Each structure stands twice: as C-alpha cells, then as structure tokens.
Amino acid sequence: MLGRIFGMLLGLALGGVGYAILHPGGLEGRIPPIPLGAFESLRFFVAMAAAGLGAIIFIAALMPKGPRGPSGGGGKKRRKGAAPMTIDFNDPAPMAAHDSGATHAHHQAEVAALPPEPAAEEAAPEPVVHSGAPPGAPGAFAEARRELHEHTRAERWSEAADIVRRLSSLAGDDHERTLAAQDAGDFARAQGLTDQAADAYDEALTYARQIGEPSGLADALTNVGDVAYEEQRLETAVDAYEEALALRRAFAQAQPGDLGGKRALALALERLADAREDRGHRMRALDLYRESLDISGALASADPVAYGEDLAVTRRRLAELEAKVLA
C-alpha cells in the first residue's frame, strides 16, 4: 500500500514538473521559470516527457497487482500441492489456507478451471464448507456461503463477488466473521488482488486470535504469511510462518497419531524454509527441510499412496537447496 501511495505522489510530482516547464511564470507568476540550459529548444518535448512519465507511474500505482506466474517472484519454487488456486468452495484442498491438502507452491494465485459437474446418475457430494464451518449449518450466513459455492462452480463471478461483499454483514459471531474474511481473502487472491486479500486475511487473523482455536489460528497465520511472501514482505511472512509452525508442532505432539496434523506440520516447515531461504538463511532452511523430510518419510511409510508424492517433492527441494549451499 505504501508503494502505491509513493507511486501516486511521484506521478503527480512529475506531472507538476511537466506543467512548470511548459508554463514558466504560470499561475499568476507563482511558478518560477525552470532553466533547461542546452535543452531549452526542446522545452516542449521535455515537459511532455515528464508529464507522460508521471501519468504512467500514477496509473501503474492505481492498477491492482496481478498474480505471480511460475517464473515470477525470482524463480520461486514449485512444491507439493502445486495446482493453481481455485475459488471453488466444493473442495478445500486447493485453497490457500488448507495445509491438509496443499502448500503455497511458490504462492501462485490464479483462477483455475473448475471441475466438471457430476454425471446426472451420480449423487452430487455434499459441499465441504471452507475453513471448517459445519455443513448444513442453519441461518442466512450458511445459506449465503452455499450460494457462493454454487456461483463459483458455475463461474458466475459477479454474483459470487456480491455474496462475498455481503458475508460479513450476515455473520452472527466471531467464527462466522472469520470465515467471511477468509472467503473474501481467498476470492481476492484468486483474482490476483493481493492488497485486498492481505487486508481480508488480516481481518480473519484478528477474529481467529479472539477465538483462540489453534488450527483456525494456524490457518489464518498461514494465509497472512502466504500473501506477504507473494509481495516479498519476507519479514512479515517469516513471523507469520514461525507462529503457525509453533501451533502445528504443538498439535502434532499432542496428537501423534493424526496423520493430517503431521502433514500440516511438514508443510508449515517448508513454508518457513522457503521464506528463510529467500532471506538468505540457507542453513536454517536446510534444517527445516530436513525435519520436514523426516516427517514426510514417516507419512509415506504409513501410507505410500497418500503421501508418497509429498516425500518425492520434499526430497527434490532439499536436494536443490543442498546444491545451492555447496555451489
């Protein structure tokens, strides 16, 4: 946001310089003449160049940031769960917050093709409500989120956006307010609007802290970290990932038989490792990836079908990082 404000001010300043060069003594003599020396004969062109550059900078500052593609952000890593983000609320796995099914995959956020509708003879599965709201919960809020799911599946983005804007007013408690802010962040991030996503995720984190439920708080922190990582605000990303990792680690220790909790811990370790690597802390990133490898190896031994690919990706990322350290 500060970058946008600076860009707008710089654009206005350059536009003012262009006006001053073109109109010396203007505004009833309030503008002093600006000598151009050897370029005096090109005064008109210099003024237009300054004003044009200012206009370009001002407009660029107003435009929303687009999503980072696979080659964006300095060649970020493609990791496990690397399918692009979708705003289909039927399946929580591709969404940003859900360590149960995805990791940040260099934090790419883009609208993906939605899965086909089930065949007529097949019973459609009951929607899985995003971020943990109980399916079939009574009230206008749950009904609005169900409609949001339907609109996103049908790619009716205008209708979906209208519901996202209304969700917070329908929320009746902090849990629903958290979900409303979470959905708004996911929707904005899927559209590449990272500034709006960051604001929504910050709001979700505020409510999650008030509730104090560890898993929901870890999800909220992860989202804040992911958007900060995309925008290269690495200090903020590291702080959020560190706190989320502590929560994941505590849960895994308290529930050692929960494989989903262990996978969430492995993914939290890798998120933090990536942010640490980008800050230049490669040895710390190595330690984090090695810890994740131990967890991924145990998970793959317990269920090769479900966790074998995770193990392969973690091994590859660890090998890449080790090669950089030795180079």
Image: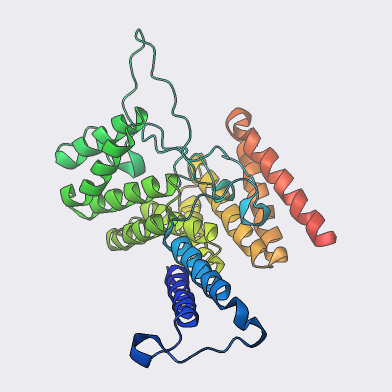
Measured along the vertical axis of the image, is residue 64 above or below residue 239? above
Instruction: Tell me the colour scheme of the image.
Output: rainbow
Residue under the image location 19 percent in, 35 percent down = 143
Instruction: Name the outermost residue toward the front.
Output: 41
Instruction: Look at the image and tell me in which quarter the N terminus lies.
Output: bottom left
- Taking the image as shown, residue 268 lies to the left or right of residue 128, namely right
Tell me residue 9's x, y (percent). 43, 75
Instruction: Name the outermost residue toward the right.
Output: 327
- Taking the image as shown, residue 166 lies to the left or right of residue 61, namely left
Q: Of 299 and 240, which appears nearest the observer?
A: 240
Instruction: Look at the image and tell me in which quarter the C terminus lies.
Output: bottom right
Residue under the image location 18 percent in, 53 percent down = 173
Q: Of 118 and 11, which appears nearest the observer?
A: 11
The quadrant in which residue 131 appears is: top left
The quadrant in which residue 304 appears is: top right
Q: Is residue 250 visible?
A: no
Measured along the vertical axis of the image, is residue 106 above or below residue 208? above
Q: Is residue 168 visible?
A: yes
- Taking the image as shown, residue 307 lies to the left or right of residue 91, namely right
Q: Of 42 and 294, which appears nearest the observer?
A: 42
- Taking the image as shown, residue 318 lies to the left or right of residue 89, namely right
Tell me residue 198's x, y (percent). 40, 59
The quadrant in which residue 124 appears is: top left
Measured along the vertical axis of the image, is residue 100 above or below residue 239? above
Tell me residue 293's x, y (percent). 67, 48
Tell me residue 212's x, y (percent). 32, 60
Residue under the image location 51 percent in, 47 percent down = 264
